[in-house]
Image (spheres, rainbow, N blue to C red):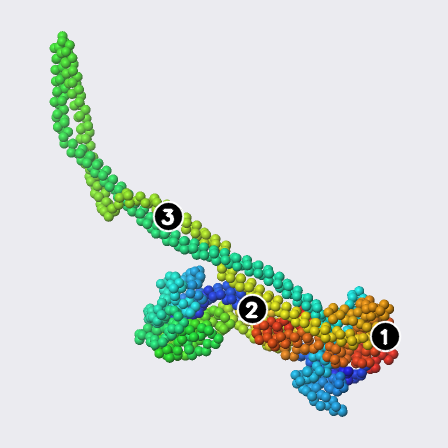
Amino acid sequence: MRSIKLVHTSDLHLGMTFKALGNKSKLHRNDCKDVFSKIIDVCIKEKTDALLIAGDLFDSYDPQKSLVKFVIGEFERLKKEKINVFISSGNHDPYKKGSVWLEHRFPSNVVVFTSNDMEAKSVNGLTVYGLAYTNDTKEPLKGFVADNTKDFKVGLIHGSTTNINWEENSEAGYRKISKTDLDNSKLDYVALGHFHNTLEIKSKSKCFYAGSPEPLSFKNNKVCSALLVAHKDGNTSVKPIPTNIRKFETFTLDCTNFEDESEIRKVLEKKKDENTIFRLVLMGSPSLNLDLDIGSLEREFDQKYFFLKIVDNIHLPENLSEDETIRGHFIKIVRAEIKKEKNDEKKKRLENALRIGVGYLDKKM
Amino acid sequence: MVQLIKLDINGFGKFEKETVIDFKSGINFITGLNEAGKSTVLEAAMAAIFKYTPSQIMPFYCWRNEHICRTALTYKTDGGEVFRIISDYKSGKRCLEKIERGKAHEVATADKNIEPILKNHFGFDDRKVFENTAFIRQSQMAILEDSSVRNRIKDMIEEVFAGRSEASATKALAKMKKIAKDSSKEIYTLEEECTDLKEKLESAEDTKESVVKDSGDYERVSKNLTDKQKKMEKMVKNKRLFDEKKALEKDLDNVNTQLEQVEDFLESVPKDAEIQSKSTPNKAIGIALAAVGLIVAIVGMSNIIGTIIGIIFIIGGIFKYRQQEKKIKPVKKVNEKSPEYAKRRRELINKKAVAERRLEDYKLVNFNSNDFTDLENLEQEVESLKERKVELQTSIKTTNELVDNPDDLREQLNCVETDIENLRIKIEEHELAAKFLLVAESEVHHKFTPAIEKDSKPILKEITNEKYSELKIDENTLDIEVKAPEIKKYVNISYLSQGTRDQLYFVLRKVMSDRLSGNVNVPLILDDPFHNFDEERLSKTMTTIQQIAKNKQIILISHRPYHKEFKNFAGNVIDL
């Protein structure tokens, strides 16, 4: 078998709208494009045989024309270097009527899998088995065995391996791939997509989720990569190449007994990074003296982050004085309301109302 | 009556070494120079009753006694029991003891157990609320002195009711309502922005559609143009070939004609001799005719007809002679050019061969002129398609440049909508706060104003030597009226003298602190409030304080030696 070099990526979700990022959504959408170009650069620099895209290259099946034009332009760059591109569609950019895959002509070096079943495409010692994403229920590797050839055999699949723990993911059950299926596939490398973080799946075949090369949410790891897969002298190595421009980070701060914002400011100062999408979750029960103005804190530190979101999850302290003053009566009345209220959101409204009322009485507002 | 009995301070603020301060019932006067630690005594008592946070206690650490920071406060409750609260601020440990027959028993050590007991004993668990109720400070009395501002007592009542210094439920409510109103205005502006954005978005989407349509047209036009251009190019090429072929054919015809002529001439050259030989008879005929004519003319001299015939013969002879002469001349020239013509013939033959060979190349060019009648139309069509293409290109470019991208607009809209939603939440929270604060305010007013009214009357009567015994507090406005004995009518207290207002102030403060502490008779703490009083006002106030002290422990702090100025003023003088 000759030596083979591949770059494996997936889940770029080009064209995605980042609703949570507000006015930075567009910028981050462009980051994703930049990272895609970066991956093309890696392919060219490493002189790879092919680029493997394991689904969800686009965030929707009918992305904007300008975006498709950009992607095609990038593929043309690979064409000049005689690098092939293999694409399996994903649940976000499924292969169907009216989809980007049918509406646009891709350069001749791009292979888009169109069959609902595993299909082989061979070039120069490399065979890529892939399939189109046409429904959520198909089990891609069920009963599949790769042909017995001397080629380096790669599977390119968008789906969910059943042996990993998909926390809070509604798409966890899409296109199940069992460990047995992987073990029986006789593939030399399985390039997976769907999961957004880089992850190795232990099986008889070498098997990896590449993960999104640019983070898309707070669930992403701090470092996102494309995978450089090299096969040489019978050995297959997988090396992550960090690609991300931004990083998502969540920090939880227990504010119990905080009298002022100084500790919160300290954290915001310490964590500042203009490429970080930072979410500061405030927990615990700070003193009523804490005059928390999340809006102004966000505005103050906005320039020091790519995007800053402060989440107010603080609770009222237990030992509030319900004395005979108006302040005490007010606290007593609102707390009784809070206790009665079942809806968490309304509870939070009432807690904030209590902080506001006490704030005005205490002359902090 | 709650009474502080003893405060043991060690390593706290000014008190680096252990200091014990004993309190008694009645008036306790803490005096001393500035920086002697008068206020520290109060802080130490407050820190003992209301647990201070580490950041609150930090300023009281002594750098010369860094291992110890400790207080122990012994007090008697309203019920007459004696307790001691011991606080070690370095270790954070606290201990509440009950003292019976000179022996201390541990009651509680955990904050969560100590705090409710202390609240029970002192009526409050919030230091600021306690201070707001039980402390009278100089600044508050200074305001009282300012007679230009009316109803300062009312402010005091509001403040004590509210629970925080300078606070007022009424003012807080007004502020909350203002915030809610301002936010509503802000929402209104944002909603306008929203509408704008939605309109923009709609038009952007329309434009996008028109761009899509234009793009479609553009592609169609481009394709059509390319096709037509190709067709035209082909036709032009064909026409060129056709024209070339035609030209060649014409050339060939010319050559053929010339060749024919040349060959004709060349063929005519050998006949020259014949013409030459024939010329002589012509001449001879001419001469003969002329001679005959001459003879006939001479012979027929007598006869006119003979003469005429003779002349005709002569003329005919001459003509015949002349005719022959003409014919001979060109033939002579041909004869001279004959070799040149032969050469020309060879050339023409060559030329013909070349032309024929070239025509051979055009063997497949089989058009007729009808085939090219469309060319002009086609050219026109291509021109107009070119124009349309440029037009569409410009239209797409300008719309793309001028009109925002719908996705961007949608995101902007999303941001504004989030802002509106946040403002709505802000309004909701402020309105909730206002709603409940209003309830709390009316509850407190309703609960306490009649009681305060009732409690104040006998003390006021006693203090004013029965001059004023009736007063009314409006439950809603907190306006206070006192019955003026002279006119037997209620008058607003702003019409009363400064002295009477001071008396009323202390009476109300005592009554309110008793009531708001949940009927616990807590000590009244006077933090040098009489500092600016003149002798007369001070003297009157001292009398009032002494009256109040009959049924309340008073702790007065001042660097001014009241105990020397007023006889029997204080039962207990603590000189630091």
**Residue ID at (19%, 24%):** B326
Chain of the residue under the numbered disc 2 shown in the image: A
Labels 3 and 2 in the same subunit = no
Residue that label 3 marks: B382
Labels 2 and 1 in the same subunit = no
Look at label 1 and name its amino acid. Glu
Residue A146 vs B410, above or below: the answer is below
Residue B233 vs A106, above or below: the answer is above
x then y, percent, for residue A197? 46, 73
Residue that label 2 marks: A308
Q: Quadrant of the N terminus of chain B?
A: bottom right
Position of B135 with respect to A350 (left or right) is: right
Q: CA distance from mark 1 to mark 3?
A: 116 Å
Residue that label 1 marks: B466
The answer to which quarter of the image holds residue A261 is bottom right
Residue at the extreme front: B488
Q: Nearer the viewer, residue B448 or B159?
A: B448
Q: Nearer the viewer, residue A5 or A193?
A: A193
Q: Nearer the viewer, residue A318 or B58?
A: A318
Q: How many residues crowd mark 3 within 10 Å: few (<14), some (14–19), many (20+)?
A: some
Look at label 3 and name its amino acid. Val
